[in-house]
Image (spheres, rainbow, N blue to C red):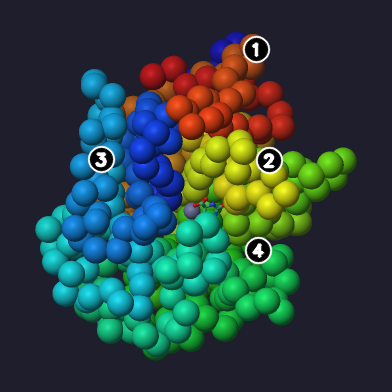
């Protein structure tokens, strides 16, 4: 018997679209399934001012193929020079929907990020006043902290004190990867939510490291032990409104991944919805997929859920995808779910 589910069309609350040739290749892969997405600002140079965000939004709309409907929700990259007035004006204009905090050195193109959090308090105070969400890459960058512990240490030493100082600030802890992060988001007081990526639901560090090192599974925050993957799956499928989808689909050319010092990021936009249906079915929670992918995010960002629907059908034959996508600058490898995917997106 074929099984079908119909949900409101999803949005992606954390997405890297890049720029130029890469943007042209990856944008249709998101727009095919997602109506809206929060667009990460870590370009080179980063999207730091309202003018930068407006110009980037124009480039995205120009790259969108005719007939496709997609709304980019822009963000600003927080730096120690960010002007609170510029941020507030961009929010009042409806141009931006969040500001992104990268601790300097935490990940790809984060070198212009924040070194001393105190220096951005005037911006954060203004954001708390006007209700503008702060999206946080939640990892410390100190060299003596093990890469697998960086999220947990961040919660205790950075996030908790920050939220004590600014209890009115709306915070999204992005790409939660540990049970500690899940517990924090579920239990903390005040205005907090957490996004969870496709790949952190599908794989753990064994998939990345056992039997050979798989550069296409390398991302940041790095995938953790299986017990953390289990906690992420439990949270995503729990129906709790504080947890929702942010794919963190982060394409890099194969040449930049398959090298002695490879870039972090998994390109998951094309097969995310099939992966999610797979995970939610395995967890016996297909009825919670719509909340995670299509309802909790809009509620959090004060936007209406999408009216249009998406139908997924489970078939005997697995989905087929190209292994790689071509850009004029080189190829780009799709996230390998490591299992056959049987949930096909019909519409
Ligand atoms: O894996 C990642 N890739 N994590 C990030 O935080 C950034 C992203 C990127 O831009 O490539
Ligand atoms: Zn990201």
Q: Give the farthest residue toward the right.
A: 211
Counting every numbered tag in the picture gives 4
* Residue placed most toward the observer, 346 or 72: 72
Comes first in the chain, label 2 or label 3? 3
Name the element at disc 4.
Answer: helix
Separation of residues labelled 2 and 4 (CA atoms): 30 Å
* Residue hosting label 3: 59
The residue carrying pointer 1 sits among few (fewer than 14), some (14 to 19) or many (20 or more) residues within 10 Å by Cα, namely few
Horizontal and vertical percent position of residue 203: 69, 44
Separation of residues labelled 1 and 3 (CA atoms): 40 Å
Separation of residues labelled 4 and 1 (CA atoms): 34 Å
Disc 2 CB within 8 Å of nearest ligand 1 atom: no
Comes first in the chain, label 2 or label 1? 2
Query: Where on the picture, by quarter, is residue 340?
Result: top right
Q: Residue at x 71, y 29 (%)?
A: 339
Tell which tag, 2 or 1, sits nearer the viewer.
2
Q: Residue at x 68, y 76 (%)?
A: 143
* Residue hosting label 2: 258
Separation of residues labelled 2 and 3 (CA atoms): 29 Å
Name the element at disc 1.
Answer: loop
* Residue placed most toward the observer, 226 or 134: 134
* Residue hosting label 4: 179
Name the element at disc 3.
Answer: helix
* Residue hosting label 1: 316
Name the element at disc 2.
Answer: loop
Comes first in the chain, label 1 or label 3? 3
């Amino acid at each position: 018997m074929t099984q079908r589910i119909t949900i409101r069309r999803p949005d992606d609350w954390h997405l890297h679209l890049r720029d130029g040739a890469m943007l042209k290749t990856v944008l249709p892969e998101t727009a095919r399934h997602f109506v809206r997405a929060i667009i990460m600002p870590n370009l080179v140079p980063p999207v730091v001012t309202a003018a930068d965000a407006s110009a980037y939004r124009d480039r995205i709309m120009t790259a969108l193929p005719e007939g496709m409907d997609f709304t980019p929700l822009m963000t600003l990259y927080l730096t120690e020079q960010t002007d609170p007035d510029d941020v507030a004006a961009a929010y009042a204009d409806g141009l931006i929907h969040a500001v992104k905090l990268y601790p300097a050195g935490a990940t790809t193109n984060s070198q212009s990020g924040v070194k001393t959090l105190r220096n951005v308090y005037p911006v954060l105070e203004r954001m708390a006043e006007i209700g503008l969400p702060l999206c946080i890459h939640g990892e410390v960058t100190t060299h003596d902290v093990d890469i697998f512990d960086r999220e947990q240490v961040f919660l205790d030493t950075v996030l908790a004190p920050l939220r004590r100082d600014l209890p009115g600030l709306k915070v999204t802890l992005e790409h939660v990867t540990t049970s500690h992060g899940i517990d924090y988001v579920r239990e903390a007081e005040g205005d907090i939510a957490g996004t969870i990526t496709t790949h952190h639901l599908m794989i753990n560090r064994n998939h990345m490291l056992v039997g050979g090192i798989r550069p296409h599974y390398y991302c940041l925050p790095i995938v953790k032990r299986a017990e953390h993957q289990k906690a992420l799956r439990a949270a995503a499928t729990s129906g709790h409104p504080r947890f929702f989808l942010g794919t963190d689909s982060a394409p890099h050319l194969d040449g930049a991944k398959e090298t002695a010092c490879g870039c972090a990021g998994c390109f998951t936009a094309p097969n995310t919805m099939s992966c999610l249906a797979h995970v939610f079915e395995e967890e016996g929670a297909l009825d919670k997929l719509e909340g995670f992918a299509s309802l909790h995010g809009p509620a959090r960002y004060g936007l209406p859920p999408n009216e249009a629907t998406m139908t997924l059908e489970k078939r005997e034959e697995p989905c087929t995808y190209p292994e790689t996508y071509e850009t004029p600058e080189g190829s780009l490898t799709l996230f390998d779910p490591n299992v056959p995917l049987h949930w096909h997106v019909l519409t």
